[in-house]
Amino acid sequence: MTLRKYLISMSVLSLLLWAVFVFIANSVDPEITNWLGFFLFYITLFFALSSTLTIFGFILRLIFSKKNLLFNSVRSSFRQSFLLSFLLIAILVMLAENIFSWLNIIIVILILSIVEYIFISEK
């Protein structure tokens, strides 16, 4: 797959995922829904954020880092957007469950930093 096809397909997928998220957000009533409604809300938000952040991360890497191979930039931006999206969803879940604290955020950030370090050190 060429870079142009990748960017076009990711952009279309991102728009589709945001449309699905908006549909789910408008359809689910948080006061009467069960766990499935919350799961669909968070999972669609996660995938929509991941795809959007992947595109933006790749474009920023393309602009500012001319030394990296394109494949490495795509892989890094996808991995980091996945981790950042997980962090944002974890924060939202903690806020919804009233367990949000700075200690919990620091623990999640440390775990995600360790995961990122493991991926970087595999090279």
Image: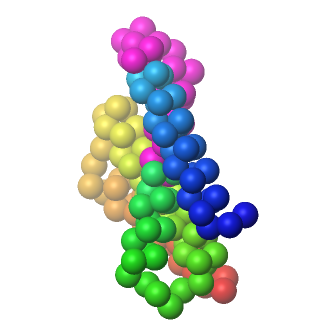
* Along the line of sight, the residue nearer the viewer: 40 or 93: 40
Q: Image quadrant for the C terminus?
A: bottom right
Percent across and percent down for residue 43 are: 54, 36
Say left or right for 96 vs 50: left
Q: Residue furthest right?
A: 1
Q: Residue furthest top?
A: 32
Percent across and percent down for residue 113 are: 46, 70
Give the residue drawn at x 54%, y 86%.
68
Colour scheme of the picture: rainbow
Percent across and percent down for residue 62 are: 46, 76
In reply to whether residue 54 is colored magenta, the answer given is no
Figure quadrant of residue 89: top left
Give the residue drawn at x 39%, y 71%.
60
Give the residue drawn at x 47%, y 22%.
24
What secondary structure predominates along the stretch shown in magenta?
Answer: helix
* Camera sees residue 118: no
Above or below residue 100? Residue 69 is below
| Numbered label tally | 0
Say left or right for 66 vs 92: right
Q: Image quadrant for the N terminus?
A: bottom right
* Along the line of sight, the residue nearer the viewer: 50 or 122: 50
Figure quadrant of residue 96: top left
Q: Residue furthest bottom?
A: 67
Magenta range is: 26-50
Percent across and percent down for residue 91 are: 36, 46
Above or below residue 103? Residue 33 is above
* Along the line of sight, the residue nearer the viewer: 90 or 67: 67
